[in-house]
Amino acid sequence: MPPIQTRSGNQWFADHRDRTAHFPVSILIHGAGGTHLDWPSELRRMPEANGIVPDLPGHGRSGVQLRQSAGAYAADMIALLDALKLEQVVCIGHSMGGAVALMLALHYPARVLGLVLIGSSAKLSVNPALLEGLATDYPAAVQQLVSWQYSPVSAMEQRRAVQRLGALSPTLLAADFAACSQFDVRTQIGQIQQPALVVAGDEDRMTPFRFSGEGLCDQLPKATLAKIAGGSHMMMIEQPEVVAAPVQRWLAEARWSST
């Protein structure tokens, strides 16, 4: 489908909504340097998600605009929801997409029914060597990044990721990770009253479990934790059915209330 015109510019999204479904619409927000294809079909086509799956501005098919913060991406998502005339959604975010989801809950609470946060945290620390490498030796930085994101046994997925990220504009990926490095809502996250599902991998080297799992769950007043055994940062690609199971169950059992 063609991009939709919003006040933030043209935004492309995959539309997996079923107008006859009895589930609220979810918006699935990918992470740094990603696209909607970072969400495998088990998640993006999940009936309970009833989802729209955008490419963030500057990513995939959504044009060349660059954003400098999770808050700016959150404003883009509100512009998309307004263009689609969606008043409230469940926000499902991976990594930087989780940061965007948290910014939506903090700054646009009336638009957010609930949160699913996968491999994310209230603060996204980025290794300074990665930020420097993205500026000085992009191919080597991409290799290092992929080795941190995926499990060592996922050789095929790593090769695909290196090829995809290697084809990106270095400026785009550097901007995304700069936005991640600046993200910190630890003093605000206790204000979020929407129900949340925290999905965390116990072998995540980008966002370690102590931050993405129990730490994040403890900070959110109404959170449930789903721990993914052997889960890497890209757990939804490596273990799509395992990650999808708790998300599907949580969405199916949720009792939503407007904020």
Image (tube, grey):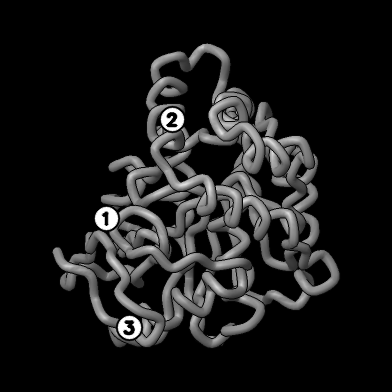
Q: What is the distance, in whole Å, between disc 1 and disc 2 at their CAs?
A: 27 Å
Can the viewer see residue 197 in this picture? no
The residue under label 2 is 161
Is 19 on the left or on the right of 157, as rendered? left
Q: Is residue 115 above or below residue 112?
A: above
Q: Quadrant of the C terminus?
A: bottom right
Q: Residue furthest front?
A: 136
User: Which three-letter amino acid code belongs to the residue tagged 2?
Assistant: Ala
Mark 2 or mark 3, which is nearer the start of the sequence? 3
Quick one: SS at disc 2? helix
The x and y percentages for residue 213 are 71, 44
**Residue 56 on image: x %, y %:** 42, 62
Q: Mark 1 or 3, which is nearer the eye?
A: 3
For this view, does 25 lie left or right of residue 201?
left
Q: Which residue is mark 1?
A: 47
The residue that mark 3 highlights is: 6
Task: State the mark number for residue 204.
Answer: none
